[in-house]
Image (cartoon, rainbow, N blue to C red):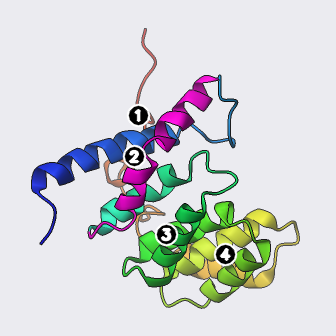
Amino acid sequence: MGRPATFRSITRGRLEVLTRLAELDEWGVPAPESLGGRVCAAVLAELPLLLGCLTDPDPFVRQAAIRPACVGTRPADPAVVRTLADLYESDPSALARADALTALALLDPDPATVRHREATALDDREREVRLAAALSGLDRAEPPYPAALMAVVAADGAAVPGSHPAPGASRADRPRRCGADRRPRT
């Protein structure tokens, strides 16, 4: 039997706030006394909730919990790495597996394990996982980029729904970016 609906809605709401806070930390671990440091501390205080969300039955919740679970955890919390590795290995959601793979590339302390996991993922049955592996590998590579990684990006990147508007699509049909349609106030 699943969790009560009220618990799930509260958890989803907290998870959404934590995810938005996590998005503020784009450049590593900030100093503890800075605003970013306080944000990281607030997110890390919720680590038990986040670890629980990584094993939630709802694939949306699992995927949404990945980014905030990674905030400020360098060196990585071993429980986070283990949970992400389990998520990558066995989750039925391709998007959750792809995001877990990307998070592991950032958090796993063993570079050889990261490279092996990514090399294996390049042959995964799901294009999202293959693309995540290729992009992660390219992130560490320097030009000239490995042809195998570029081939995956060319084949699987163009196939991601919503990543490219259809030719002739009206502006209303295109994906919107936050603030993209705002005009300056006069």
Residue type, label 3: Thr
Residue type, label 1: Asp
Label 2 with label 1: CB-CB less than 8 Å: yes
| C-alpha distance separating marks 2 and 4 | 26 Å
Nearest to the eye among marks 1 and 4: give it.
4
Residue type, label 4: Ala
Q: Is residue 56 magenta?
A: yes
The residue sitting at 57% across, 47% down in the picture is: 71
In the picture of the structure, the residue carrying the numbered disc 2 is: 176
Residue 181, numbered label: 1
Instruction: Indicate the position of residue 1 as horizontal and vertical percent values.
Output: 12, 72
Instruction: Indicate the position of residue 43 as horizontal and vertical percent values.
Output: 48, 40
| C-alpha distance separating marks 2 and 3 | 33 Å
Label 2 with label 4: CB-CB less than 8 Å: no
Q: Which residues are magenta?
A: 34-57
Q: Earlier in the sequence, mark 2 or mark 1?
A: 2
Nearest to the eye among marks 2 and 3: give it.
3
